[in-house]
Amino acid sequence: MDVLGSLLQGFYTALTPMNLLWCLLGTTLGTAIGILPGIGPALTIALLLPITAKLDPTGAFIMFAGLYYGAMYGGSTTSILLNTPGESGTIITAVEGNVMARKGRGAAALATAAIGSFVAGTIGTVAITFLAPLFVKLALLFGPAEYFALMVLAFTTVSALLGLSLSRGVTSLLLGLAIGLVGTDVLTGQPRLTFDILSLLRGIDIVVVAVGLFAVGEALYMASRPDMRAAEIVPIRGSLFMTAEEWRRSWKPWLRGTALGFPFGALPAGGTEIPTFLSYFLEKRMSKHPEEFGKGAIEGVAGPEAANNAAVAGVLVPLLTLGLPTSATAAILLAAFEQYNLKPGPLLFASSSTLVWGLIASLYIGNVMLLVLNLPLAGLWVRLLSIPQPLLYGGILLFSTLGVYTLNNSTFDLVLLFLVGILGLLMRRYDFPVAPCVIGLILGRLAEAQFRRALTISQGDASVFFTHPLSLALLIIAALVFIGPLLYRWRAARLQSPKAAG
């Protein structure tokens, strides 16, 4: 009953006119940026951080959450009608969805994607409601040693699982850790990596780095591409109401996709790509019509879209209860918490219960809003694709510059912004993942604080990280995650060498 009482209190907060407006704004903006290829929720939230710095935190996070959910809805529209995924989690949707659209079944594909997203988002939000308090009880068992080990696990997973290679992931992570060291040491008061520049004594603002890497870096990268041309948009044909046969073939994939997606979202670096691909292949294996896959099978849209949205819901559980980001967007949301001097974790549910439960309640409301926005208005949203990309990314650069300048009215921040933006451009150009850098910057400072705290409590005895069972278990898992890909590649190379020699 305590959970239900807290949820009712959350609805009381979320249903105020102002918060309903923030929810509507977030879901509408999220749908729009999901439809526009290459934008994404991480970039947009990073862009909004300086603009929302003075807002009420509850309203700001309700808007951010609506934007995150909405981007997953909108991404399916471009996958189906344009064969260009708006989000990485909708890549597999294009395989069957675009074929359906070309056969005149685009409306049915959009309908099963929207309803599947609604079903998965709602079930995922129910799971957040009841699982988050359990995670809070688990998190209360964590001391400084356990929190440090948990952050080491986050470092290894994001560097090993995100990006094309382990070395590039680790390089990006170390870069973020180094940026986080800039400033004045809290314990000793000594300047670190400031190079006698007074403006660096306060450190490099997380918002400046987030906006630089995601917004400015992405805009510069898109501007450097010669292939920014319009693609063919398949018109929407057919009724948006699914037939009885389409309902019968969709409802089980929705549930299976939800069951696959939510756990992957809660895992460090689980993301949306793996569960959506797994869902597609599962539906192909379980289908009574496997021959239709590749030719417009509706199960190939229903399952992955449900997995995609359920994974997004799963991301919020470790973020709120442990302060652990499991995706690039979650890392930006963690930066937003830092901006408001809020610390995600078990104490957040006690110190900011109005914000947390108002946010969870708004997810239920946002899901209903998104269903209404996406089903009847699909044709209207597609018109966004006619915006010239030079104008779109030029606007992103403009708002990035204005937003960062208003943080501290500092021209030095603008210099840093574009230096970080050029770094983001180079990282995109040479396939270095950006997410490990942001996570290293945010969690690096927290990991250092927990490391020092653990050593202080143990009077300098470093064995404290190995004598606590939970801390030891987390470090062992982190080592396996890091070493596992190396062992796999070494074993694959050994198995292939005799064949090559023969």
Image: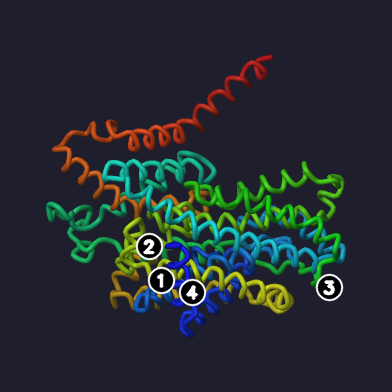
> Does residue 227 appear in the picture of this structure?
no
Q: Quadrant of residue 167?
A: top left
On screen, residue 62 above or below 144? below
**Cα separation between marks 4 and 3:** 34 Å
Identify the mark nearer the N-term, 4 or 1: 4
Amino acid carrying label 1: it is Leu
Residue situated in front as seen by the camera: 482 or 84: 482
Q: Quadrant of residue 121?
A: bottom right
Q: Position of residue 285 (x, y in %)?
A: 77, 41
Three-letter amino acid code at the position of disc 2: Ala
Q: Judge whether residue 360 can be spotted in this image.
A: yes
Q: CA distance from mark 3 to mark 1?
A: 40 Å
Q: Which residue is mark 2?
A: 335
Q: Point out the tag, 4 or 3, that comes first from the N-terminus.
A: 4
Q: Which mark is residue 239?
A: 3
Q: Are marks 4 and 3 in contact (CB under 8 Å)?
A: no
Foreground pick, 163 / 452 = 452
Circle 3 packing at 10 Å, graded few (<14), some (14-19), many (20+), is few
Q: How many marks?
A: 4
Please give the label number shown on residue 11: 4
Q: Nearer the viewer, mark 3 or mark 1?
A: 3
Circle 1 SS class: loop
What amino acid is found at the position of numbered circle 3 in the picture? Ser
Instruction: Give the percent coordinates (x, y) of residue 242.
Output: 81, 67
Query: Do labels 1 and 2 touch, CB within 8 Å?
Result: yes
Sequence-wise, the earlier of marks 2 and 4 is: 4
Residue at image location 64% in from the left, 69% down from the top: 35
Between label 2 and label 4, give the one nearer the viewer.
Answer: 4
Secondary element under disc 3, as helix, strand or loop, is loop
Q: In the structure shown, which secondary structural element does the residue marked by tag 4 occupy?
A: helix
